[in-house]
Amino acid sequence: MKKIILALLFPICLFAQDDLLSEIDTVKVNTKVQSAFKSLKIVNIESTKLAAKDDFYFIVAHRFDYVNQGFDDFFGLDNANTQLKFLYGVNDWLNIHVSRSGFQETYDLGFKYLLKSQQKDGFPFAIVGFSSIAVNTEMKKENFPKLKFENRLSYVTQVLISRKFTEKLSLEIAPTYFHENTIRDILDENNAVILPNPQDNSQFAIGVGGRYKFAKRWSVNMDYAAHLNRANQSIYKNPLSIGVDLETGGHVFQMHFTNSRAMHETGYLGQTTGDWGKGEIAFGFNLVRVF
């Protein structure tokens, strides 16, 4: 009798299993696209890559002087700005960093946070927010008797929007707002801003960048930031950087040429002095090590 009951139920079980499998086959699963960029920065501009939870990064960045000085300073290698940065993945959607730069003896604190991931057969972009605050400690009280702590501060907020088009090509756009409490680019002999068109403390820029992977461990990277409300008399230029990334297991080595010697955000966005047309280009590198 038991054998007869099992014989009757067996085909029913088969049909139920087939129905369940067919339903599973029709479900569309949106999976997250892996990082569009292999390093935390394209060159100067932050990328949409975030450190994973509990990952600790140590980053050493160098910018030498402009190569057009020739042998006088060995094509800029005698003079360098260095930035040391420590970054931690608080969780999979939030990173925090602290750094110190030789440029204007600057300390900065930054946060990068995931807003939306790019999905396969789903949402087409990755959207990441970035905010930082920087303190210029180069300014001395003896040179600026009325100097207050807030005069040293600058801020930046960016929305980073990237798309990984293929395994080789990724592009990004970065609408940016930044504010410098002290503007020193257009000064007279009394350290006063020249009128009638001084630089606004609140400034806007659009950054663009991309990565193209041309070999298993190599890619070419480029980024550029267009300042949108720079004063007519300003001595500063838009930062343009071109370089290559080398992936070597536990770290990424970035080598590049750029007209910006500053490495923190308000520095390269608002105070880049180099002119590519005049050969005012600096060699630099970023060494990224993850633990």
Image (cartoon, rainbow, N blue to C red):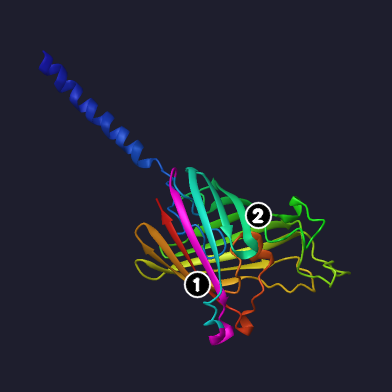
Q: Residue at x 68, y 67 (%)?
A: 271
Q: Is residue 226 magenta?
A: no
State the image coordinates of residue 205 (x, y, percent, origin top left): 68, 63
State the image coordinates of residue 90 (x, y, percent, origin top left): 49, 42
217 vs 105, left or right, is: left
Callout 1, which amino acid? Answer: His
Q: Nearer the viewer, residue 18 or 231?
A: 231
Q: From this viewpoint, which residue is outermost toward the bottom? A: 71
Q: Residue at x 14, y 22 (%)?
A: 7
Q: Residues within 10 Å of mark 2 (few under 14, many from 20)?
A: many
Work out whether mark 2 precedes mark 1 in sequence or the reverse, and give the earlier one: 2
Q: Nearer the viewer, residue 66 or 132?
A: 66
Identify whether 32 is placed above or below 284: above
Identify whether 86 is placed above or below 205: above
State the image coordinates of residue 30 (x, y, percent, origin top left): 44, 45
Identify whether 151 is placed above or below 24: below
148 vs 42, left or right, is: right
Dividing the picture into quadrants, the one containing residue 79 is: bottom right
Q: Is residue 70 magenta?
A: yes
Q: From this viewpoint, which residue is outermost toward the top? A: 1
Asked if one can make out residue 130 in the rendered structure from this viewpoint, the answer is: no
Asked if one can make out residue 95 in the rendered structure from this viewpoint, the answer is: yes
Q: CA distance from mark 2 to mark 1?
A: 24 Å
Label 1: element kind: strand
| Pointer 1 residue | 256
Q: Residue at x 41, y 43 (%)?
A: 29
Callout 2, which amino acid? Answer: Ala
- Magenta residues span 53-72
Q: Nearer the viewer, residue 278 or 230?
A: 278
Q: Residues within 10 Å of mark 1 (few under 14, many from 20)?
A: many
| Pointer 2 residue | 134
Label 2: element kind: strand
